Every structure is written in structure tokens, then in C-alpha cells.
Image: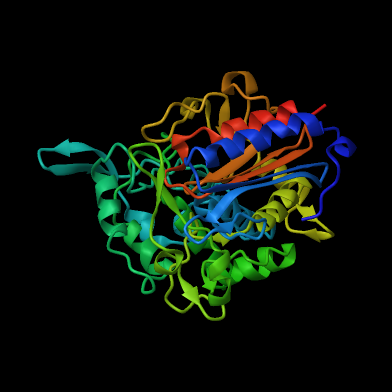
């Protein structure tokens, strides 16, 4: 990864050393195996930090070509895929999803329990594409802290899935049988709606979802390792996934070859579920290409993916005031944030308690991957590690604070 001097983009080399000490401390204390941080300004990388190990047991160090599970960062990529087709006039954002996925016409809404039976009512309004992009459609998640009847039904179905063997069409049509957690556009609820969006892309484009991403986003942007499956030869570059112990240290989950789908040629086999909301693997170099495309308002190195106005639309708040502040199940409210199309977008940096400028937007993934784009400060950042659950340590917050204090 090519870099420039921090001074050439208005950053302090001396103050960037805080990043090295803070990230290395997490490794030295055994809280994570390794971390990669990348910062760029005005499209030029001025900091790359690789700390600790990608695979601690086999002494494989973190590198910029280490492959990470990016999990829910997949949602931002799916949002871009949807917006590409929106630009081509295939639909409008407030269009009813049942125009494309009719199985959701009769999906009902959960309002409570009557004894041991769920009480369900009809939808008062349609589920729209915009609601799916902003988690306001009422689609359950299956892994929430508050396990209502729809959440339990979703979890029961999701735990029966096996790979390969389930395609997006089958998955989404099954989702339609599960009640919504609330009336559409009345509650922000992190759910499985991005699977519907991936299916929408398949229906409109006529391509399998993974092929659309490959042909329209990954190959044009040079995201060479972004994929739902791993080539056998690349297995040594795959970071191990760790989980916390009660004593604050970590232990390895399954070896990558046991929990990452590996094929000889890196092709997704028929019948393989390719989620719109998770499932992708990528390197820091891949994710930086994607983030730079958004920073440059839809283009990078002469390749245009989205129009500038569409990127601005993506990064704008789309939630009505009644749904703000929103919150993840079991977490604190997201003060100072609205929700864009597939990304969180900063509307009040004071309320958020962050040094970023209003208009900053980001997406993270549950295994420990984050990118953010701050157009006003011309800053793009990545923080990538592999810990489930990643949120037990404020690594993202510390990395962002250090990044901004280094700007001059």
C-alpha cells in the first residue's frame, strides 16, 4: 500500500505515534490478536499500522493483504449495488418491495402475545426499498437482545440453514412468513432486510448476486480479494477469529478452514446463499478502495460506480424525527446520528461526542471491521481486527479520536 508523509496531507507524524501505542497495547494485553489501521487524507494514505498477529497460533502477522470477515460492512456494499440500479431507473426508493418480491404482500405485523399465541395484524403501509436500506421496515434479525416472537421465529429459521443448500429466493420467501416486529416506518430495528435487497438486485439485474458484485463493483474497483468464498491458496492469508474469555483474554474460535467456505478457484457454487447483509471477506486494501470510491463521490482512478449526487443521497439521513435517536438492541441510543442508505451518518457531532465533522458516515461489521468517510475533513479511516464480540473494547472510538487529533 503506497503511502505519503503525514506532513504532506496536514497530519502530524509525532501525534500519529499515539495510534501505534494505543493499538499495540490492546495486542500486548491479550485483548485482541492483531489490528490493522489505515488513514488517508485527500485520497492519499498517510498512515498504515499493522499490529500483532492475524493468526496467533501459527505466528502469522497482520498485513494489509490479510483477509478479514467484514460481516455487516457487506450492507454498505449492498446499498451501493441497489443504488446503481436505482440510478438506471429500475425502481424508486419509496417503491413497494412487493412489486418485485410478491411473497411479502401478506406478511403480517406482530403486536403482542395472547397467551402463548402471537397477536398479528395487517400492515398499515407497504414495505419500501428505502425502509429496507434504513432498517425501518420491521424485518426481524433473529439475534436481538429482546427476543420477541418474530425474533424467535427468525432465529429458529436461521439456525436451520446450511451452506450450500439455500438460495436467496428460498431464503427471502421464507422471511415473508415471519411477522414484522413493528409497522413499517415506525421503528428502527436492525434486521435481515438486506437479504431482500440482495434478492432485489438479482431480480432486476438478472444476475446471481455474487456475480453482480463481482462484475459491477469488485472488479471495476480492483477489490481483488472481496468474495463470499475463499480460494484454497489464500487460506494462509485468512485471519483467525477470536472470542473473549471471562478473564479478559481471548481464545481462538474455529480454524478458518472449518468456518470459512473454501473452494479451489474462489467461485461461489450453485445453491450457495450470498447474503446482502453479511458474509463477505475482504482485505484492508479492498475496503480502502471501496471507501475511497465513496470519498471521491462515486469514482476512483477513473472508474465511476455512482453519481456524486447519489453518494450524497446515500450519506444523508433518511429517518424521520420520530425514529431518532435509534439504538441497537441492548445498546445505548445513537445520539447525534441519523441513518443513511446502508450507513450511519453523523448529524450532530456534539451529541455524538465525536471529533468528526457532521456529514461523516460509516459502517462496521460484527467481527471487528470499520470504515468511515469524513468529507469535510477529507479523511478516510479503516480499523480492522477479528474479535466476536468486537464491541467489548472501544477500539474504534480510540482509533478515531487519535486520527483526528493528528490532523493539523
Residue lying furthest top: 350
Is 137 on the left or on the right of 175, as rendered? Answer: right
Q: Compared to 383, does 214 lie above or below? A: below
Relative placement, left or right, of 16 versus 56 is right
The image quadrant that residue 283 belongs to is bottom right
Residue at the location (36% across, 32% down)? 330
Q: Position of residue 368 (x, y in %)?
A: 51, 46
Q: Could you say where residue 172 lies in the image, as x and y percent from the top left? A: 39, 61
Rendered residue at 57%/36% (across/down)? 25
Residue 45's spot in the image, x, y percent? Answer: 79, 46
Q: Is residue 359 visible?
A: no
The one of 31 and 9 positioned closer to us in this rendering? 31
Q: Is residue 176 left or right of residue 117?
A: right
Q: Position of residue 123 (x, y in %)?
A: 34, 44
Q: Nearer the viewer, residue 157 or 124?
A: 157
Name the foreground residue: 332 vs 383: 383
Q: Residue furthest right?
A: 8
The answer to whether 182 is drawn above or below residue 152 in the figure is above
Q: Is residue 138 above or below residue 261?
A: above
Amino acid at each position: 500500500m503506497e503511502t505519503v508523509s503525514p506532513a504532506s496531507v496536514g497530519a502530524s507524524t509525532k501525534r500519529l505515534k499515539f495510534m501505534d501505542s494505543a493499538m499495540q497495547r490492546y495486542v500486548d494485553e491479550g485483548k485482541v490478536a492483531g489490528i490493522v489501521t489505515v488513514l488517508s487524507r485527500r485520497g492519499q494514505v498517510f498512515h498504515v499500522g499493522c499490529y500483532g498477529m492475524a493468526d496467533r497460533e501459527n505466528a502469522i502477522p497482520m498485513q494489509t493483504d490479510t483477509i478479514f470477515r467484514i460481516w455487516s460492512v457487506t450492507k454498505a456494499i449492498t446499498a451501493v449495488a441497489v443504488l446503481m440500479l436505482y440510478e438506471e431507473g429500475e425502481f424508486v426508493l419509496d417503491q413497494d418491495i412487493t412489486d418485485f418480491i410478491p411473497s411479502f404482500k401478506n406478511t403480517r405485523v406482530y403486536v403482542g402475545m395472547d397467551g402463548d399465541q402471537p397477536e398479528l395484524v395487517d400492515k398499515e403501509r407497504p414495505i419500501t426499498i428505502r425502509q429496507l436500506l434504513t432498517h425501518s421496515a420491521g424485518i426481524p434479525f433473529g439475534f436481538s437482545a429482546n427476543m420477541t416472537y418474530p425474533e424467535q421465529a427468525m432465529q429458529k429459521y436461521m439456525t436451520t440453514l446450511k451452506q450450500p443448500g439455500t438460495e436467496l429466493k428460498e431464503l427471502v420467501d421464507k422471511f415473508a412468513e415471519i411477522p414484522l416486529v413493528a409497522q413499517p416506518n415506525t421503528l428502527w430495528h436492525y434486521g435481515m432486510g438486506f437479504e431482500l435487497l440482495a434478492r432485489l438486485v438479482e431480480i432486476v439485474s438478472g444476475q446471481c448476486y455474487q456475480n453482480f458484485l463481482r462484475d459491477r463493483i469488485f472488479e471495476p474497483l480492483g477489490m481483488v480479494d472481496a468474495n463470499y468464498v475463499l480460494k484454497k491458496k489464500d487460506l494462509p492469508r485468512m485471519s483467525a477469529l477470536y472470542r473473549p474469555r471471562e478473564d479478559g483474554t481471548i481464545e481462538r474460535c474455529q480454524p478458518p478452514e472449518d468456518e470459512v467456505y473454501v473452494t479451489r478457484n474462489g467461485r461461489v457454487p450453485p445453491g450457495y446463499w450470498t447474503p446482502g447483509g453479511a458474509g463477505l471477506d475482504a482485505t484492508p486494501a479492498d475496503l480502502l478502495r471501496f471507501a475511497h470510491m465513496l470519498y471521491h463521490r462515486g469514482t476512483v482512478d477513473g472508474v465511476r460506480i455512482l453519481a456524486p449526487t447519489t453518494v450524497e443521497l446515500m450519506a444523508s439521513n433518511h429517518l424521520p424525527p420520530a425514529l431518532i435517536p435509534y439504538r441497537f438492541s441492548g445498546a445505548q441510543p445513537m445520539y447525534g446520528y441519523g441513518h443513511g442508505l446502508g450507513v450511519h451518518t453523523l448529524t450532530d457531532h456534539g451529541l455524538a461526542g465525536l471529533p468528526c465533522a457532521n456529514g461523516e458516515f460509516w459502517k462496521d461489521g460484527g467481527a471487528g471491521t470499520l470504515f468511515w468517510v469524513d468529507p469535510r475533513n477529507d479523511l478516510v479511516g479503516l480499523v480492522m481486527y477479528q474479535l466476536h464480540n468486537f464491541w467489548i473494547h472501544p477500539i474504534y472510538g480510540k482509533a478515531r479520536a487519535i486520527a483526528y487529533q493528528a490532523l493539523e
